[in-house]
Amino acid sequence: MNWFPKQSAWDEMEAARLKRKEMISSFQSQSQALVAGFQAAANIQIQGIGELAAQSAQSRLQAELDARRKELEERYAKFDKLF
């Protein structure tokens, strides 16, 4: 009971070509999304490392500032005793 005519070989090849084209397009868009995700993750990681380095430098500078302030206060206390 072949009520519907079979597709010609050309039509089958054309349908397969269109299906491959859609699959390739889908794969490329998924690959681009994956690459964008990895780039975003790398940028976030770099930014986080930069923030940690900045906080560490700020802590070191603050400790140095506190030490120098304490040293100057001790020197000032010595001068205050002279007068």
Image (spheres, rainbow, N blue to C red):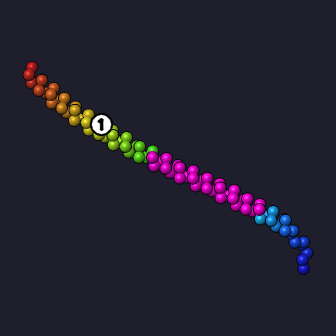
Which quadrant holds residue 64? top left
Horizontal and vertical percent position of residue 13: 80, 65
66 w.r.t. 81: above or below:
below
45 w.r.t. 6: above or below:
above
Q: Which residues are magenta?
A: 17-46
In the rendered image, the quadrant that contains the N terminus is bottom right
Q: Main secondary structure of the magenta part?
A: helix
Left or right placement of residue 43 versus residue 76 in this view: right
Is residue 33 magenta-colored? Answer: yes
Residue found farthest to the top? 83
Q: Which residue in the structure is indicated by mark 1?
A: 61
- How many numbered discs, if any? 1
**Mark 1 crowd level (few <14, some 14–19, many ≥20, 10 Å Cα):** few
Left or right placement of residue 29 versus residue 46 in this view: right
Which amino acid does the dot numbered 1 rest on? Leu
Horizontal and vertical percent position of residue 78: 11, 26
Closest to the observer: 74 or 21? 21
Residue depicted at 8% across the width and 22% down the height: 82
In the rendered image, the quadrant that contains the C terminus is top left
Horizontal and vertical percent position of residue 31: 61, 56
Residue found farthest to the bottom? 1
Horizontal and vertical percent position of residue 9: 84, 68
Which quadrant holds residue 4? bottom right
Residue depicted at 84% across the width and 65% down the height: 11
Which quadrant holds residue 25? bottom right
Residue depicted at 37% across the width and 43% down the height: 53
